[in-house]
Amino acid sequence: MVRHDHPTPVLGALGLFTVLLGAALPLIDFFIVNVALPTIDHDLDAGPALLELVVAGYGLAYAVLLVLGGRLGDMAGRRRLFLLGIAAFGITSLACGLAPDAWTLVGARVAQGAAAALMLPQVLATIQAATSGQRRARAMSLYGATAGLSMVAGQILGGVLVAAAPLSSVFGESAGWRSVFLVNVPVAAVGLVLAARSVPETRSERPAPIDVPGTLLLAASLVTLLAPLTEGRAAGWPLWTWVSLALFPFAAAAFYRVERRADRKGLIPLVPPSLLRLDSLRRGLSLVLPFSVGFGGFMFVIAVALQQGLKLGPAASGLSMAPMAAAFFAASLAGPGLVRRYGSRVVTAGGIIQALGVVVLVITVWRDWSGLGMLGLLPGMAIAGLGQGLQLPVLFRIVLSDVPPERAGVGGGVMTTTQQAALALGVATLGSLFLSLAPGSGMRDALAVTLLVQLGAVVLTTLLSLRLPRAVA
């Protein structure tokens, strides 16, 4: 039993496993619905706009509240917020799984995203505050591996669960999509029990009050950007989408000015500009952004292309990601040793390998679209996954390497908000590009063009990696 009042909290092996389980759940659930969307549409008669909201409602609530979740953990105790978040995640997952109609599902997904935003920032903050030295480096590598693997595993698990349809006798013959949400309930219950026993309590020694203006302006900035990009195509680009996009730069500028003014006055804003002056954090985030945009868009587009274009079932579509997941995991395990020897150049090498994987996928799609299946996708998926596994865990270590422990919650919130907003932006932009091209150009050409755009994001990430500090703390 962990003594939660210990003056120097230590995160043991079971505690690390527990918080990593908490990190996996929100990321799995961002992607797990991709392969379930056709059956959700069939069962609930959702339509394109509401299907977009099932994805976007979760992502928006998650991204908007992440930094606030980190601040609350700094104030009230990270273990306490983690327990609250994982319990709320289990309850809201149950609500998603039992939703009787599409609008109820959208509302439950928004609440699920808010619960995830309470839970996830406490993971990084607890690792930063309750580990040190080589143990922290190993924990951060495991966090990065967990994050990347969860994003791929979510799509695989979703396909298998939808195909298995274990709840069909209760909810209807195609209602297996409910299991992608209900599977979270026992997992969250186990996580709750483990967290109560193994996660130490940590909090900031000088907790800051809630930055209400900063929170509202950050929410306005993310909503005015992500909501129209996500919903615009499905809704036919009505006037509100253009008004919202026009308001985004003003909301973002106002957020920055308010935060900078608070920082200069000696207050602690939601996202302190002084924190962004940390070279490792700023340069690391500049890579997390294009990496996550490309990754989020790819995972959404490939699910649609395989199911609607090639008529693969949800299980085959999901399992097509398995080579990517396996290669990512292998690279993540090798990463710490490679980083000790080569430093941040591992990220550059990973970018080159990922670019090669995307090129292989483009060639594969272009040459053999009609006969394409899991075996044909294997080489490109595996090479791309290998490159991604060499990048993401190292980037997470770099971003947080110089963040002081008392600001761990804020630092983790900033990083996860950037990642989550970029994943949602990738779904919105690359997803909209693909879905706009598909009716006129066909699925093959639309997928090839979208992959080439993603390749541009990979090249940008690779070039930016040359600016990273060579040594990785």
Image (cartoon, helix red, strand yellow):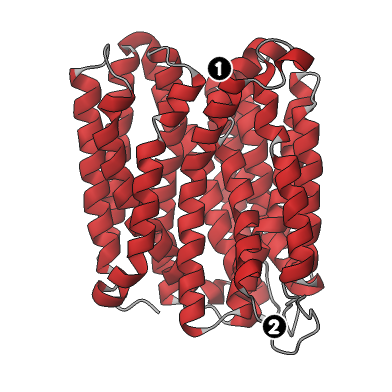
Number of residues whose C-alpha sits closer than 10 Å to that of mark 1, classed few (under 14), some (14–19) or many (20 or more) = few
Q: Position of residue 366 (x, y in %)?
A: 21, 21
Residue 396 vertical position relative to residue 328 in the rendered view, above or below:
below
Q: Residue at x 23, y 29 (%)?
A: 362
Q: Residue at x 75, y 31 (%)?
A: 96
Q: Residue at x 46, y 40 (%)?
A: 296
The answer to whether 130 appears left or right of 5 in the picture is left
Q: Quadrant of the N terminus?
A: bottom right
Q: Position of residue 264 (x, y in %)?
A: 63, 80
SS class, disc 1: loop
Question: What amino acid is at disc 2?
Answer: Pro
Foreground mark, 1 or 2, reads 2
Residue 271 makes an appearance in the image:
no
Q: Which residue is mark 2?
A: 9
Residue 9 makes an appearance in the image:
yes
- Where residue 179 sits, quadrant-wise, is top right
Residue reaching furthest to the bottom: 7
Number of residues whose C-alpha sits closer than 10 Å to that of mark 2, classed few (under 14), some (14–19) or many (20 or more) = some
Q: Which residue is mark 1?
A: 236
Residue 124 vertical position relative to residue 48 in the rendered view, above or below:
below
- Where residue 344 sits, quadrant-wise, is bottom left
Q: Residue at x 55, y 77 (%)?
A: 274
SS class, disc 2: loop
Q: Position of residue 414 (x, y in %)?
A: 57, 62
- Of residues 316 and 65, the one nearer the viewer is 316
Question: What amino acid is at disc 1?
Answer: Gly
How much space separates mark 1 and mark 2, taking CA atoms?
A: 53 Å
The answer to whether 234 appears left or right of 373 in the picture is right
Q: Position of residue 203 (x, y in %)?
A: 74, 77
